[in-house]
Image (tube, helix red, strand yellow):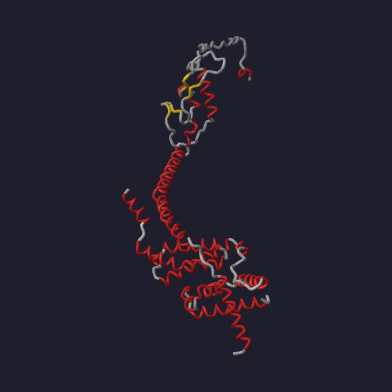
Amino acid sequence: MPEHLNVQDDDLHAMDREISQLLAVEPSADFAAKVRVRIAEQPMARAAWRFWVMAVIPAAAVLLWLVATTDYSAHDRQPSSVAHADVTLAPAPGNSVQRPVKVGPDAVPNHIRSRGLAAGGWRPAARLQPGEPEILIDPSLTAAVRRLGAEQPTLPEVSPEPSLDPVVVEPLKVPEIADGGTKQGDRQ
Amino acid sequence: MNEWADSLEGLVTVDAGLESEFEARLRESSTLAFRVAYGVLRHRQDAEDVAQDAFVRAHRSFRQLRDRDRFRAWLVRMTWRLAIDRWRADRRRTAREEAVDMPQAASLEQQAVAHDRATHLRAAIEALPEKLRIVIVLAAIEEHDIREVARLLGVPEGTVKSRLFLARKALAEKLRCLNI
C-alpha cells in the first residue's frame, strides 16, 4: 500500500478517535430520574386535556348557543327599540305639581305614538309587513312628548264642529223696468 | 361519574410489564440519546433536556416500540430531530461550551494545539450536511460499526459506508486546509 495512503488512514483513524473523544460525554447521574419525573407529569397533562375536552368545550358550546339565540331575539325586537317603558317623571323645577306624575301610553297623543305604544298598552312591536314603512321616533323626542304630557295631563277639549251662525240669504231685489222703455229687439 | 374516575385512573395506570421494559431501555439507551443530542448541541444541559424529551415521547409510544432495535433506532432519530430543531431555534449554541474535556497533554503548548484542533474539528463537523453529520456522530458514539449505524438510521449499509467516507474526506480536507 502506498505510503501516503497509510498516512491518510492514520490521519483518519486519529480523527475518528478525536471525534469519539469530543462526544465521550456522560449524562448527569439524575438523568433517568428526571425522565421519570417528566413521564409522571404526562398523565396529569392528559387528564387536564381530557378535562378541557369534557367540561369546557360543552360549556363553551352552550354559551355560544345562548349568545346566538339572544342575538337572534334581539334582532327580532329591533323595531321596538323606539318604544320605551313607562317612566316616572319628576316635576320640572318651579312646577307647582308636587307629586311625580305617572305617564303612560295614553298620555301620548296618538299621532306621535310609536309602534310600541299601541292603544292597548305596551306590547312588543309587531313585525313590519312587507312594504310597510318603518317609523322610528327619536327617544329624546318621545321623552319630551311624555314630559309635555305630564305637564298637561289632559288635552284641551276640542268641539267636534265649530258653532256657526246660520247663514241668512236675503232675497235679491231687482228694480222694476219702466213701462215707457223700448226693448232692444223692438228697435231693430 | 364512575366513568370519569375510571378514565382518569386508566390514564395514570400503566401496564407494569411495559413499565419495567421501558426502564430497561432507559438505562441502556440514555447515554446514546444524550450523546446524539450533545453531538448537535454541544451543551450539556440542552442535550439532557432534548434527550429527556425524546424519552418522554418514546414512553408515549412504547407499545409500538417494545422491540429493542426498533426502540433504539426510533430514539436516535427522534433525539437527532429534536436536537436539530433546538439547534436551529437557538444558533447561539455555536458559541457555547468551546472548552471540552481534552486528554491531558504533556505541556501547555500541546494543550493549546489540542484545543485548537478540537475547536476546528467541531466546526468542521457542524459544517457537514446533516446526512453526513449524523453518520459520523453515530459512528463515533459507542464505537458503532457500520451495521449498527445502518440499523439505527434505517438505511442500507452501503449508504452508511459511502456517507461515512464522504464525511471523513470532507473533515480531513477542512482540517488540512487549516494545517492542523
In front: A102, or A188? A102
Residue drawn where x is 39% and y is 50% of the image: A54
Q: Position of residue A8 (x, y in %)?
A: 61, 83
Q: Seen from this angle, which residue lies furthest left?
A: B2
Above or below, A90 relative to A70: above
The x, y position of residue A78, in whole percent, is 48, 37
Could you tell me which quadrant the C terminus of chain A lies in? top right
Location of residue A17 by image quarter: bottom right
Q: Position of residue A21 (x, y in %)?
A: 56, 72
Front residue (pair A150, B25): B25
Q: Nearer the viewer, residue B12 or B158?
A: B12
In the rendered picture of this protein, how many numbered marks are placed on residues? 0
Query: Vertical placement of A184 versus A114: above or below?
Result: above
* B171 relative to B50, above or below: below
Q: Residue at x 57, y 10 (%)?
A: A173
Q: Residue furthest front?
A: B106
Q: Nearer the viewer, residue B30 or A84?
A: B30
Q: Position of residue A10 (x, y in %)?
A: 59, 82
Instruction: Name the quarter where the N terminus of chain A is drawn.
Output: bottom right
* Residue at image location 56% in from the left, 17% down from the top: A93
